[in-house]
Image (tube, rainbow, N blue to C red):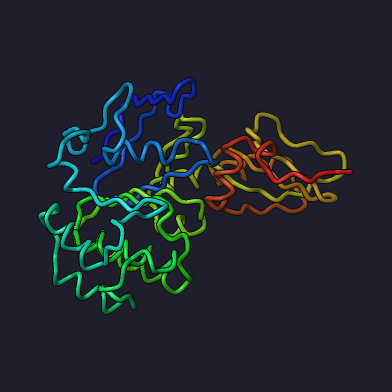
């Protein structure tokens, strides 16, 4: 289990993380989402022991991460911009990681090279961005870590390779109970793989729940009411739009309870639609104030 407790980090006058706390259960796929500048990469660098917090602590199974080689050896990290030694090949980097990670498997490294069409003797810097990400996954999975921390892991990969990567990651979770913390702007893809989600905004945790619980507690309702009929009062409406008589409501609450309550208005039509993670993200961050806006001239 990863426990982030009251982490604060400042860079000069700028507060990147503000008393941030979150919990990643063992064996979970935890999606960390938020707008640009919300602090996602900063908290990831704390979790991987790169940054030292100004306040608070980060524990993995009760052990601190910062300046703790034994704990760090359980973590494999793929950053947004992968970095390797100048002119190093995959095989040379594999030798380096094999000396650090006790579970590094040369057998697995060779098997992964059968899946990813990469030349292990070629300098990684000559690879395209997508090929460098593939190389990062080969090395990461050969380490056989207990925890994978992934920052925009599929950026630059084609759709087929994205599916291949997630298939391998999910197999590790099922077979080895690997814990995965992933930050990505591709919310549609996260929705398919995550079971827990944390939403960051301005260095604070806006909310943290299982994805199923999050989807159960916010609902999109399409409803048309008879002329002269108003919506029942007491609804926690996050956003409302209308097209003719048809209203589209984003409402906080459970679907069955909301539709039962709205039936009191005797609607001409009503349908409840589950929200996607992307829609939940938008409306939890402020609804209409965070939507795409047009410039009127």
Q: Position of residue 137 (x, y in %)?
A: 31, 63
| Residue 162 in view in this figure | no
Q: Position of residue 48 (x, y in %)?
A: 28, 41
Q: Residue at x 21, y 55 (%)?
A: 177
Which corner quadrant holds the C terminus? top right
Q: Residue at x 44, y 68 (%)?
A: 128
Judge by depth and name the residue closer to the eye, 27 or 212: 27
**231 relative to 196, above or below:** above
Which quadrant of the view contains residue 91?
bottom left
**235 relative to 75, above or below:** above
**In the visual, does 210 lie left or right of 13?**
left
**In the visual, does 233 lie left or right of 295?**
left
**In the visual, does 15 lie left or right of 289?**
left
Q: Residue at x 16, y 41 (%)?
A: 71
Which quadrant of the view contains residue 132?
bottom left
Q: Position of residue 258 (x, y in %)?
A: 60, 41
| Residue 252 in view in this figure | yes
Judge by depth and name the residue closer to the eye, 24 or 276: 24
């Amino acid at each position: 289990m990863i426990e982030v407790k009251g982490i604060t980090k400042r860079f000069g006058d700028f507060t990147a993380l503000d008393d941030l706390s979150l919990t990643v259960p063992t064996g979970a796929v935890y999606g960390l989402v938020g707008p640009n500048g919300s602090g996602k990469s900063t908290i990831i660098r704390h979790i991987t022991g790169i940054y030292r917090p100004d306040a608070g602590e980060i524990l993995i199974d009760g052990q601190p991460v910062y300046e703790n080689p034994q704990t760090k050896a359980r973590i494999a990290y793929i950053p947004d911009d992968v970095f390797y030694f100048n002119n190093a090949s995959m095989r040379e980097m594999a030798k380096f990681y094999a000396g650090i990670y006790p579970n590094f498997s040369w057998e697995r490294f060779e098997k992964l090279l059968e899946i990813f069409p990469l030349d292990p003797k070629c300098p990684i810097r000559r690879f395209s961005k997508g090929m460098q990400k593939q190389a990062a996954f080969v090395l990461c999975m050969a380490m056989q870590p207990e925890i994978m921390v992934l920052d925009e892991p599929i950026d630059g990969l084609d759709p087929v390779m994205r599916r291949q990567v997630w298939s391998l990651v999910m197999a590790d979770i099922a077979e080895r109970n690997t814990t995965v913390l992933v930050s990505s702007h591709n919310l549609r893809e996260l929705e398919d793989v995550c079971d827990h989600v944390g939403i960051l905004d301005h260095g604070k945790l806006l909310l943290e729940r299982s994805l199923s619980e999050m989807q159960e507690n916010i609902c999109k309702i399409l409803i048309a009411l008879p002329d002269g009929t108003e919506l029942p009062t007491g609804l926690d409406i996050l956003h409302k739009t209308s097209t003719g008589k048809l209203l589209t409501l984003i409402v906080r609450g459970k679907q069955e309870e909301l539709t039962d309550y709205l039936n009191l208005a005797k609607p001409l039509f009503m349908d409840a639609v589950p929200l996607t993670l992307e829609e939940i993200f938008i409306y939890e961050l402020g609804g209409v104030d965070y939507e795409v806006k047009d410039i009127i001239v």
